[in-house]
Amino acid sequence: MKRETLTLTRPDDWHLHLRDGATLRAVVPPSARVFGRIMAMPNLKPPVTTVVQARAYRERLLAAVPEEAGCTPLLSLYLTESTTPHEVEDAQASGFVVGFKYYPQGATTHSEAGVRDLMRCEGVLKALAETGMPLQVHGEVTDPGIDVFDREAVFIQRELIPLLERFPDLRVVFEHITTEAAVDFVRQAGAGVAATVTPQHLLYNRNALFQGGIRPHYYCLPVLKREEHRQALCAIVAKGHPRFFLGTDSAPHDRQNKETACGCAGIYSAPVALPFYAQVFDALGALDKLEGFASHFGADFYRVPRNSETVTLIRQPWTVPLTQDFEDQTLVPLGAGEILDWQVLPSGRMDQGSWLDSRRGIRSGEESPGSTEQDAG
Ligand SMILES: NC(=O)N[C@@H](CC(=O)O)C(=O)O
Ligand SMILES: [Zn+2]
Ligand SMILES: [Zn+2]
């Protein structure tokens, strides 16, 4: 018989972009209501490169977390060629900075301040290896001679393998992996190497980018890959491998900056991420593996306790809202207008009002106030 409800340890999102200002205030609540911990990426303008900046950013994040949500923001520091080993010490002492983010310069959104040559960061890498604080890696080479679909696989050969040879104790999170090569690499690596997996890379292959025309809302970096790669990602998470865990890479960009001649990379998945992951695991016949992936393995890797609360998903179809509107901005969520099988029930700590409030500003495709989406609670 098909399962109709699914109760999990409250999950964590180990990779997402929460931006700043009005966007931050709009995108934090949907994540905070579901996830116990949210790992905020540091690619702001200017980037979050110091613990001092991270502390200030954390205050802004905390101010945006709805009180009843009880969600803890964690932070990552943006590694630059001028980062000092001292910063690692400060990070370690802070209790809320739990990783350093390596953006190869030019690889992705707001990576201008990133690293050109990782070996210029030797002192920091040594300090990270000593403390056990993970290096979180956007794993793509930027060499213009390398095809955009091959950048992750080439990165493994050119950067990751030499890096781990030089620093065998360095703990690494290979972020938002997209290829079979990355799956194999992480599987064969030691206990100190893990990967995050996004909903979109489990759901879609690169055809989604061109389905009936060009589809900017399916564009993110690393770009979607061939079907065989999607299947390799699905296979490893369906096995419940403990070093592959949830990181949505939810990356909101205003609609105007997505639907344009040179659109930004990034998919806003946070408000629909858990239902989408449930859909994937369900289709794989692996719903029993969702909890490990979403709620256990990331906490274990980051050496923090698993959450003690739970979330419940119910099998009740709902339509993903077309947009989330606030101030003068519009975000288009992943799967806008699609029907999803699973939805998240509000937690015991949330009253009905606060759940509906989380949907406020989200415009549904259906005009009827009695639509299933509104009935979610
Ligand atoms: N994933 C993306 O396509 N975009 C991210 C940056 C990143 O994670 O690489 C963003 O900040 O917009
Ligand atoms: Zn990235
Ligand atoms: Zn990201």
Image (spheres, rainbow, N blue to C red):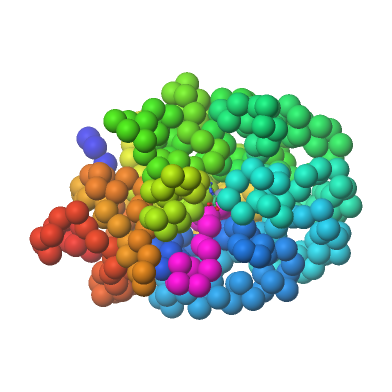
On the image, the x and y values in percent for residue 320 come to 27, 51
Using the image, determine if residue 279 lies above or below residue 133.
Answer: above
Residue located 50% across and 25% down the image = 229
- In the figure, is residue 279 to the left or right of 173? left
Q: Is residue 304 visible?
A: no
Q: Is residue 55 visible?
A: yes
On the image, the x and y values in percent for residue 230 come to 46, 28
On the image, the x and y values in percent for residue 265 come to 50, 46
Write down the region rendered in magenta. Answer: 10-25
- Closer to us: 162 or 297: 162
Classify the position of the C terminus by image quarter.
bottom left
Residue located 48% across and 45% down the image = 262
In which image quadrant can residue 151 be found?
top right
- Closer to us: 12 or 261: 261
Residue located 73% across and 73% down the image = 52
Queried whether the magenta region covers residue 238, the answer comes back as no
On the image, the x and y values in percent for residue 369 come to 12, 64
Using the image, determine if residue 331 lies above or below residue 2.
Answer: below
In which image quadrant can residue 44 be found?
bottom right
Queried whether the magenta region covers residue 16, the answer comes back as yes
Residue located 71% across and 46% down the image = 105
Using the image, determine if residue 370 lies above or below residue 251.
Answer: below
